[in-house]
Amino acid sequence: MYFIDVQGTLISDVDKTPLPYSVEFLHYLNRTKTPFVIVTNNTKQENFREYLHDLGFEFEHYLDPLMVLDEIVTQKVAVFGTDEFKQIIQRRFEIDYTNPKYVILSVGRYDSEDFSLMIELLLRGAKLIAMHETSIYVSNAKRYPAVGAIAKMLQYATNKDYEVVGKPSKRFFDKARHFLDVPFDQITMISDDLVGDLLGAQKLGMKTILTLTGKIKNKDEINASVDMVIDSLKELL
């Protein structure tokens, strides 16, 4: 049984099209009646599930951080992220950059003024919610610090903890596990994100497969142990 990441694992970080053998791999799992859940940290598209279906991916079970966020946030929020993400949050919650209950953090290009505002709001009592704990993201073939790295920085700056609603939080993985109804040690996580996905999955007892089709360019960059390293999903067919 599998949890399967999306960006860098099933689709390209560059143009968001299917990576080689990714559609075929899901076909294989369906044909062999192997249970799996698509687990993504995508927060830019509310219709991301339908987008993946349109690309040819066949799956039943799907989970993204927005589905978890809706369960825990009920009050005013300050939101930081891309314009697409801000629009999604504005349709869900009341926005307040003066006295919010929560600071919601997603991936984005931030400057010193953004960080200053985040710190002020957190020190005033707002709770930080990281949409996920992805370590780095890729844009235009360059790698940048992602939500997990920024959340750790804010934690250090304010001495305040934060909550994660996407991978690799236990809350997120527990919700995904309910689709399969098995303990974690019967699940294998496949992802291109060593720090943001696989190490957290490992701590819960899952087996881990790292694919070199996304964030990590070669085996020399791997600095922690996983159960398997593959060049592409072809090796699992």
Image (cartoon, grey):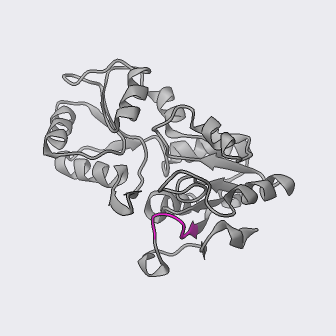
Q: Quadrant location of the C terminus?
A: bottom right
Residue 234 shown left or right of residue 227 in the figure = right
Q: Quadrant location of the N terminus?
A: bottom right
User: Which residue is depicted at the point 66% across and 66% down?
Assistant: 233
User: Which residue is depicted at the point 67% across and 48% down?
Assistant: 37
- The region drawn magenta spans 210-216
User: Which residue is depicted at the point 57% across and 32% down?
Assistant: 47
Residue extending farthest to the top is 94
Residue 213: in magenta span: yes
* Number of marks: 0
Residue 172 lies in what quarter of the image? top right
**Relative height, residue 8 to residue 230 (above, below):** above
| Magenta stretch secondary structure, dominant | loop
**Relative height, residue 39 to residue 225 (above, below):** above
**Relative height, residue 12 to residue 65 (above, below):** below
Give the image location of residue 183, x and y in percent.
69, 53
